[in-house]
Image (cartoon, rainbow, N blue to C red):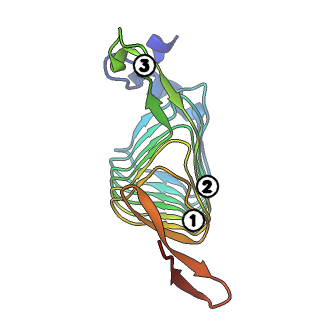
Amino acid sequence: MLRLVFNPRTARTRLWVRVFIYPFVIKKGKHSKIRSSVRLDLNPNNKFQIGSGSIIESGAIINNGIGDIVIGDNSMITCRAMILAPAIIGNNVVVGISSQVLGLTHDFNDISLSVKEQSVSGTQVTIKDGAWIGGNCCILQGVTIGEHSLVGAGSVVNKDVPPYSVAVGNPARVIKRYDFDKKEWVRVER
């Protein structure tokens, strides 16, 4: 079944699936847009849903091969961003240019096989409402980005980011948090 849907050499969905199956698999909200040059590698057995008013810009790659991808309302996946399932992206989220949300990884336990020949496994990435992911970021599997948090450009996020925080660096660390009593962003000491 998998060979009928995917080309084993390119991991790209076959043309007949994109033409005849995708219209039934993709659940689009009102006024949402998926630009024509977006690469959709969709497994018909997994969910792909995009909410109302959301947009996926040119050159983005969406792959739900091993899990569901759900994008909320009024969110934007910008140019050349990559979303690999499983991933849940909330409402009013921006995923910056060339950023990667990686819900899967390749297994490498069997040393008699190359990594390419081994299976993949995934842990869901969750990006909560109002978060902003800067350009060229890498969000690794199992990470949760809290509500209204910002991830600085070029950051590699391998741990959860709490709500109302600013995280930067490789590996990303929280440098600011919003103080609701002072009503301002406060620097976090190491």
For image coordinates 53% across by 83% down, the residue present is 185
Say few, some or many: other residues with alpha carbon within 10 Å of mark 3 (under 14 / 14 to 19 / 20 or more): some
> In the displayed structure, would residue 141 be above or below residue 135?
above
Location of residue 23 in the rendering, given as x and y in whole percent from the top left corner: 55, 34
Location of residue 120 in the rendering, given as x and y in whole percent from the top left corner: 47, 24
Say few, some or many: other residues with alpha carbon within 10 Å of mark 1 (under 14 / 14 to 19 / 20 or more): some
Please name the amino acid that badge 2 sits on.
Gly
Decide which of tag 3 and tag 1 comes sooner along the chain. Answer: 3
Q: Is residue 106 left or right of residue 184?
A: left
Residue at the spot of label 2: 72
Decide which of tag 3 and tag 2 comes sooner along the chain. Answer: 3
Q: Nearer the viewer, residue 154 or 76?
A: 154
Spatial separation of the CA atoms under disc 3 and disc 1: 32 Å
Please name the amino acid that badge 3 sits on.
Phe
Spatial separation of the CA atoms under disc 1 and disc 2: 7 Å
Residue at the spot of label 1: 92
Residue at far bottom of view? 182
Residue at the spot of label 3: 6
Q: Nearer the viewer, residue 43 or 155?
A: 155
Q: Are marks 1 and 2 in contact (CB under 8 Å)?
A: yes
Location of residue 172 in the rendering, given as x and y in whole percent from the top left corner: 42, 59
Q: Nearer the viewer, residue 167 or 43?
A: 167
Spatial separation of the CA atoms under disc 3 and disc 2: 27 Å
Please name the amino acid that badge 1 sits on.
Asn
For image coordinates 42% across by 25% down, the residue present is 13
